[in-house]
Image (cartoon, rainbow, N blue to C red):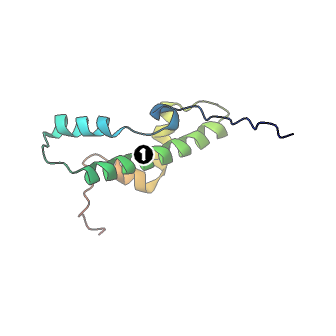
Amino acid sequence: MAKKMQRRRRQKRTRSQRGELPFSLVDRFLREEFHSSRLSSSALSFLTSVLEYLTSNILELAGEVAQTTGRKRIAPEDVRLVVQNNEQLRQLFKPGGTSVNEDDN
């Protein structure tokens, strides 16, 4: 006799549970703050991916800092330390910022 195999259904997870940044939020911010009416969907997708990548890297490093200090939660101080101690992040977030076309001299 063959028993019926019970299928387990995956529970649906929201974007916030998956850790994804919604395109609509980035789109609305760009249109409101920069008054940009011409914005392609590929540019929006690329920008959202870059923001997700930066956020995940910063939070991963901040989590390691919090863990080494014996805490389970990331504090704003941990994020600040990560940005100060990482050369690339420090250059990215320095006052005045950097541009894509800027020379490395």
Q: Residue at x 54, y 32 (%)?
A: 12
11 displayed left or right of 14: right
Q: Which residue lies under the disc numbered 1?
A: 52
Q: Nearer the viewer, residue 80 or 56?
A: 56
Q: Is residue 12 above or below residue 85?
A: above
Q: Residue at x 32, y 50 (%)?
A: 45
Count of numbered labels shown in the rendering: 1
91 displayed left or right of 75: left
Q: Quadrant of residue 27?
A: top left
Pinpoint residue 55: horizontal percent, then vertical percent: 44, 43
Dividing the image into 4 quarters, which one contains the C terminus? bottom left
Dividing the image into 4 quarters, which one contains the N terminus? top right
93 displayed left or right of 54: left
Q: Is residue 43 above or below residue 79?
A: below
Pinpoint residue 48: horizontal percent, then vertical percent: 35, 46
Task: Answer yes or no: is residue 97 visible.
Answer: no
Q: Nearer the viewer, residue 59 or 87?
A: 59
Pinpoint residue 6: horizontal percent, then vertical percent: 73, 35
Q: Residue at x 45, y 34 (%)?
A: 15
Pinpoint residue 103: horizontal percent, then vertical percent: 26, 68
What secondary structure is found at the residue carrying circle 1? Answer: helix
Q: Residue at x 14, y 43 (%)?
A: 36
Q: Nearer the viewer, residue 74 or 44?
A: 44
The residue carrying pointer 1 sits among few (fewer than 14), some (14 to 19) or many (20 or more) residues within 10 Å by Cα, namely some
Q: Is residue 76 above or below residue 81?
A: above
Which residue type carries mark 1?
Glu
Q: Is residue 23 above or below residue 99?
A: above
